[in-house]
Amino acid sequence: MKQIVQSARSGKLALKDVPDPKARPGHLLVRTRASLISAGTERMVVQFAKKNLAAKASARPDLVRKVFDKAKRDGLAATFQAVMARLDEPLPLGYSACGEIVALGEGTEGLFRVGQRVAIAGAGLANHADYNVVPVNLAAPVPDDANDEEACFGTLGAIALHGVRNMGLEFGDCAAVIGAGLVGQLAVQFLNLAGIRAFAFDYNAARLELTNYSRAELSWNLGDGDPTEAVMELTHGRGCDGVLIAAATESSAPFELAASLARDRARISLVGITGTEFSYRDFMKKELSLVVSRSYGPGRYDDDFEARGMKYPVGYVPWTETRNLEETLRRMSRQSDHRLAVEPLITHRYPFARAEDAYAMVTENTEPHLGV
């Protein structure tokens, strides 16, 4: 089968022939019908891989510390060999896709059926590949009236939905969404579906126009100045009950803006990857809370839940990553009075044979784009 992979050493992308995977216990074998490039996240991954070793070390001091710890424990020679071997491993790309089940692993009978369409999630699992093997807790059925292109937004929707949940908002509250990329756009829609007033902020005018389509009450271009006064006027001087940061930047400016827009004791949900320096005084005076949102929700990065298919007690953990994925897809159904509309977010379509061209466009930013 074909799969898009990247060299961790050189950063070079290639569409390669790799062995076909097989279903295994607790997993589904899925033939991919559509996959989504998460432009912000995957651009950062690809650009990091293209850096030389010194630049990689500068960008990820946490990995450097791990290398030093291993050198102390195992010696320089063994550590060097381990690092080189890791760099030689091809990196699969992608984590949000849709496909058709072609085989069921042992223990999945009755949960899914062959021929069923599912959205699949997970880095290293829901890859840009002809076939993928995914655990049952990272798959969810697609409504019959949602098409493949819509369904492959499932993972991004789960990320946005969990980020919204982490603000702890109620009907009638208001929320600021900083960053109008894919996750920010979906977050604005979820906020509206939940009866929460949404204010969107970005530097990109075209993306802000889309937030108007998503029914943002305020769409503010940050290039036009500080929006704090406008937000205070709309909230009668209180500020926002929650702030979701969905930006991708090395700057800490989103944190500064979040502190300015938030009301007293508001909660800030960090979904994007940004600089994390913030003013102690600003956060302390308002007693702000910060939650670093764990991608798709509870269960993420838990091998017992993801790889072994264990369940959490619904009374304690009602909204797992699986349920967030399921709810995102349910909201795409045209039978829903208030549906999640992702079609306007699609700016480019590529056949899989041209996956390298798609990544070149995204990483080199040669054209304005959003959903690819």
Image (cartoon, grey):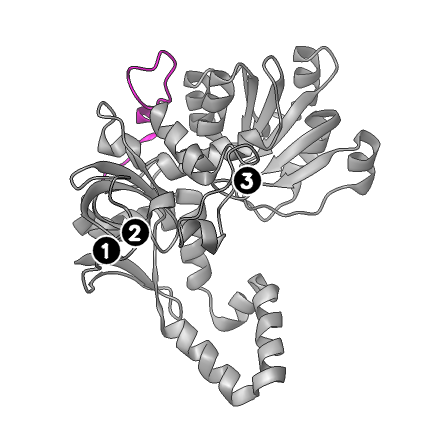
Q: Which residues are drawn in magenta?
A: 332-349
Hey, what amino acid is under mark 1? Ala
**Mark 3 secondary-structure assignment:** loop
* Label pair 3/1, CB-CB below 8 angstroms: no
Is 329 magenta? The answer is no
Q: Residue at x 74, y 16 (%)?
A: 238
Mark in front: 3 vs 1: 1
Would you name the residue on which mark 1 appears?
23
**Mark 2 secondary-structure assignment:** strand
What separation in Å lies between label 2 and label 1 (alpha carbons)?
6 Å
Q: Which mark is residue 271?
A: 3
In this rendering, the answer to whether 52 lies above or below 367 is below
* Label pair 2/1, CB-CB below 8 angstroms: yes
The part of the image, by quadrant, that contains residue 290 is: top right
State the image coordinates of residue 169 (x, y, percent, origin top left): 61, 23
Is 193 on the left or on the right of 258, as rendered? left
What separation in Å lies between label 3 and label 2 (alpha carbons)?
28 Å
> Is residue 51 visible to the viewer in this orientation of the structure?
yes
In this rendering, the answer to whether 124 lies above or below 346 is below
* Closer to us: 240 or 110: 110
